[in-house]
Image (cartoon, rainbow, N blue to C red):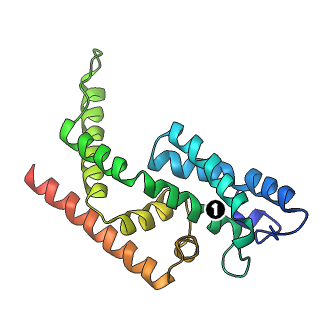
Amino acid sequence: MTAETIPDDRPDLTGARAGAELTRLYAAHARDLHRYLARRLTPAAADDLVAETFLIAWERRATYSPGRASARAWLFGIATNLARRHARDEVRGLRAHTRAGPEPDTAEAAEVRATARADAANQTAALSAGLAGLSDEERDALLLVAWAGLTPKEVAEALGINPTTVRTRLHRARTALRTHLTDRENRT
């Protein structure tokens, strides 16, 4: 469910209906938050971080300002900050995946399937290495757009930065990934 399908994505979380509003926000956004976090981390980590996102939202409900950001952007900002806690492990995992190379195919498979799987594993390793090489800020902006489906304006709201900064980070991240993938392709 997206923010456009929700009648009011800038709720009052300070009033008597704060619990009901947060429940409504959970129903509206938990699935998208989980999808985003699962793609960044793991499904198990996403389960924990979605729960933690809403716990933090409840604890900080008095600081939410509907005039500053939509609830969706606010929640994605909280989730992104939680994912940043895992950034060091994320980067280590991406680098380890790159060093390990493609997984061996243990099953007897058709030659075409094996080739496709090897190509996909190589592309995943190349993309993982490229993502690991980005700064945390560039990676956050890129993944919020690519995996969470946020607009640059929503990313700016989520991260508390200027939309122009988001566009600059996206440009730098995309350029760095293109360069990394092109350089890797030229070496093979």
Quarter of the rendering containing residue 9: bottom right
Residue 140: horizontal and vertical position, in percent?
43, 64
Is 89 drawn above or below residue 133 in the view shown?
A: above
Q: Residues within 10 Å of mark 1 (few under 14, many from 20)?
A: many
- Image quadrant in which the N terminus is located: bottom right
Residue sitting at 76 percent across and 72 percent down? Answer: 10
Residue sitting at 70 percent across and 59 percent down? Answer: 59
Residue extending furthest toward the left: 187
Residue 99: horizontal and vertical position, in percent?
18, 41
Q: Which residue is mark 1?
A: 75
Residue sitting at 11 percent across and 56 percent down? Answer: 186
Report the number of numbered marks.
1
- Amino acid carrying mark 1 in the image: Leu
Is 2 positioned to the left or the right of 186 in the image?
A: right
Residue extending furthest toward the right: 16
Is 57 positioned to the left or the right of 159 in the image?
A: right
Quarter of the rendering containing residue 13: bottom right
Residue sitting at 80 percent across and 69 percent down? Answer: 11
Residue 58: horizontal and vertical position, in percent?
73, 58
- Relative to the observer, which residue lies in front, 25 or 16? 16
Is 118 drawn above or below residue 80 in the view shown?
A: above
Residue extending furthest toward the top: 108
- Relative to the observer, which residue lies in front, 18 or 121? 18
Secondary-structure class at tag 1: helix
Is 94 positioned to the left or the right of 154 in the image?
A: left
